[in-house]
Image (tube, rainbow, N blue to C red):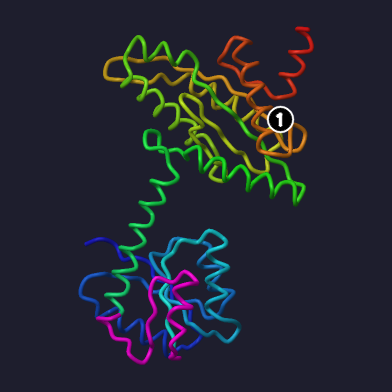
Amino acid sequence: MPPPRRLLLIDDERLQHRLVGQMLRQFRGAHFDLEIASNCREGLEQLRSGGHAAALLDYRLTDGDGLSLLAEARAAGCRTPVIFLTANTGDDLDMAALEAGAVDYLEKAALSPKMLERSLRYALRLSESLEQLRQLATRDQLTGLLNRREFDRILGDELARCVRFDRPAALALIDIDHFKKVNDTHGHPAGDAVLQHVAGIIAAQARDVDFVARYGGEEMAVIMVETTAGAARVAMARMAAHLARTPCRIGELALPVTFSAGVAAVPDDGLTPAALIAAADHALYAAKRGGRNRVFSAQEAQLAQAVAV
């Protein structure tokens, strides 16, 4: 039997806490552990923390309303499927709940164990389907990294936040060294394996708060929030060294793989996505001209160019 899933109930009525708990024990299929939040503040904190399979949200709370709570949770990135519960009735309440992002709307007076179990089953199935669609829309199919479109969206949002709050951030552009030679010598399946190998190492080495994307072809990108140029360069150098020590194994074949990277940071190297990408790209090509398997910052690239002139 699979372990029970976590179900959050946001309701300020103790009677409702007991009733929902009793209904859960009468379910025939699904099993849930019930967790309680008795006000908007606790409910929002729990929703934002994640980890719940679904949430039941009272339409009216003593310290606020469920519509506003759900809107704030969705704005914070919460994807937990939410079912509204209400003691009120009205032609417009169900539509207001659905437009706010709820997946279902149940009247407390008519609620039964069978109805609640069916609603939760529907909410979980819908959530799984939506997550699959999000993955298809935002992830690169081969590497599992964010795709270029999602990278562009996140970079724009992060730079706007940096400018507004005067906070640092860095961008690294990465290019796998001699990738064409891998394809030409060992074939495209080997090239795909190398791409997956490098993507896995970068994703594993990056922080949870960073964003790793496939930028295009054999290029990848890392958006590092709250990170200076110096710290970003150190992090990328560590990743490069780890990759150089970790060959890509394809059957009995062990292919050595390295990458070159260019790092640019806000605000010194640019305040717009286009400016930051151009600075990181310039640093990347300086790293490749410098012999590959190395990391250059935008400032180092400018210095190297000045020396060359």
Amino acid marked by disc 1: Gly
Looking at the image, residue 100 sits to the left or right of residue 197; the answer is right
The residue tagged 1 is: 230
Q: Is residue 150 above or below residue 298?
A: below
The residue most toward the top is 308
Say which residue appears at 48% left-offset and 29% top-offset.
216
The residue most toward the front is 91
Give the quarter of the figure containing the N terminus: bottom left
Image quadrant of residue 87? bottom left
- Dot 1: few (<14), some (14–19), or many (≥20) neighbours within 10 Å? few
Give the quarter of the figure containing the C terminus: top right
Q: Out of 6 and 90, give the one closest to the viewer.
A: 90
Where is residue 70? Give x, y as percent. Answer: 52, 71
Q: Is residue 188 above or below residue 92?
A: above
Say which residue appears at 45% left-offset and 38% top-offset.
145
Where is residue 120? Give x, y as percent. Answer: 32, 72
Q: Out of 74 and 274, give the one closest to the viewer.
A: 274
Looking at the image, residue 141 sits to the left or right of residue 151; the answer is left
Say which residue appears at 62% left-offset and 21% top-offset.
284
Residue 230 falls inside the magenta stretch: no
Where is residue 164? Give x, y as percent. Answer: 75, 51
Say which residue appears at 47% left-offset and 39% top-offset.
147
Q: Is residue 258 above or below residue 97?
A: above
Image quadrant of residue 138? top left
Q: Which residues are magenta?
A: 87-115
Q: Is residue 164 above or below residue 251?
A: below
Number of labels in the image equals: 1
Element marked by disc 1? helix
Residue 112 falls inside the magenta stretch: yes
